[in-house]
Amino acid sequence: MARTRVVRESSTSSPGQPADRRRPLHFAAFLLLADAALVALIIAFVPYTKIDWDAYMSQVDAFREGERDYTKIEGDTGPLVYPAGFLYVYSAIKFLTAGQVFPAQILFGVLYIVNLSLVLLLYVKSEVLPWWALGLLCLSKRVHSIFVLRLFNDCVAMTLLHAAMVLIVYHKWYLGLIIFSGAVSVKMNVLLFAPSLFLLMLKAMSIKGIFVALLGAAGVQVLLGLPFLLSHPVEYISRAFNLGRVFIHFWSVNFKFVPEKLFVSKELAVTLLVFHLTALMVFAHYKWFKHEGGLLRFVHSRFKDATSVQQLISCKPIRSNLSKEHIVTVMFVGNFIGIVCARSLHYQFYSWYFYSVPFLLWRTQFPTLVRIILFVGVELCWNVYPSTAYSSLLLLFLHIFILFGIWSSPAEYPYVDKKDKTNSNKMAKTM
């Protein structure tokens, strides 16, 4: 009877498995086609909104005319505050579009679809969401606007970041770090992913491998910034990598309820930084390294298990084949912690984490209806213009609630363990 039951189960379930696996791919392909059509309609019929494009073009012009002093490269919205990769990217865009908005919109429409393709690949491979929930990735009015009606450099940076994540998911760590560094060179918000990335590298790579990967990433920054580092190094570093910038209170989407005097204070900045670092350490110790006994125990084991300095430097951890789900989870959650603790989020900053929101919601144990309500709530907050004390307070509450849901959910098993797979297959055959 047991044998008959196994045969029936296998005969009814196995034919459906390939179809179930293909369904997300088919739906993702449909979403790409549908969203491409939507992007084309937006470009054709929705008026372009002038914000930073002219400033970008002015800064590119100064660079192409030979200016290498970052303090003298400015636009109508202020001085240049992005690393050198930004200038190269937008110089290429100006070359392709002659500085005209409409062809640039078409280019950013293509960029939008490329970015969406990368994100869908991450979702499909991590297998966290049901297939139908992939449609949430195409439903943001604000993100469509950021890409094809605003032409912000955030779009380029996040596309490169998602490309780096795809490479890392496939364990192409060295190339992934190169692309990651390229994303940082366009806009520094990508550094919010850096703590998570470093922790994943500790799990997956030898100390020597980590050093080589970081050296390659640093080399990208030096190479891109070389024209400025050779002529005006202090001006370049102080402007392009200024971590102490204070944003304008009016444009804040997440802390508009805070009085402006407190908003610009160092006390608030230091408090949020402490919360940020503390949350990262707590998640790392109790969630991301839970199966290793905690972060400190994992680090200690790296030294304890080594019999020589050469082994310590050159050998990977015993288990180093990280699962796709774990990689994406750690990257997205680490970035989201930075978002929750950010002193100011401007409207274009929504692109920093929108594409992770469905993934984060499905990493919680909330009912599906609650997940949808949270998704809609976050989107509505980002579409209130100008932001109000109530909308920003609601957004902060939703962020904290989502983070609490992630914290309360079980930690995923981080490794692709071939031995465990073999044992489970043997058990299935025995049954």
Image (spheres, rainbow, N blue to C red):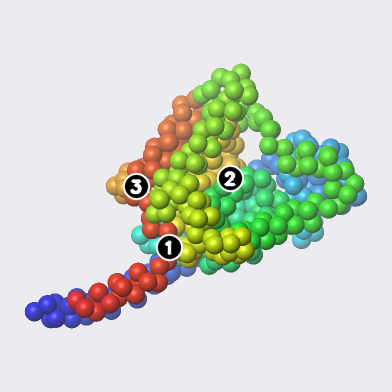
Q: Rounded to the nearest whole Å, what is the CA distance between mark 2 and mark 1?
A: 24 Å
Residue shown at the point (62%, 48%) measured from the top left: 190
**Mark 3 vs mark 1, CA separation in Å:** 18 Å
Mark 1 falls on what kind of element?
loop
Residue lying furthest left: 1
Which residue corresponds to mark 1?
A: 415
Q: How busy is the neighbourhood of tag 2: few (under 14 within 10 Å), some, or many (20 plus)?
A: many
State whether residue 230 appears in this view.
Answer: yes
Residue 159 location (% of width, % of height):
61, 56
Q: Amino acid at mark 1?
A: Tyr
How far apart are the two marked residues, 3 and 2, measured between alpha carbons? Answer: 22 Å
Residue 325 or residue 20, whichever sits in front: 325
Circles 2, 1 touching at the beta carbon (< 8 Å): no
Mark 1 or mark 3, which is nearer the start of the sequence? 3
Disc 3 residue type? Ser
* Res 15 label: none
Q: Quadrant of residue 416?
A: bottom left
- Residue 352 in the image: state x and y as whole percent: 56, 46
| Residue name at image x 47 percent, y 64 percent | 318
Q: Nearer the viewer, residue 297 or 277?
A: 297
Res. 81 image quadrant: top right
Is the residue 45 above or below the residue 132 in the image? above
Left or right of 309? Residue 374 is left
Q: Earlier in the sequence, mark 2 or mark 1?
A: 2
Q: Where residue 66 appears, x then y in whole percent? A: 91, 50
Q: Which residue is mark 3?
A: 409
Q: Quadrant of the N terminus?
A: bottom left
Q: Earlier in the sequence, mark 3 or mark 2?
A: 2
**Residue annotated with mark 2:** 192
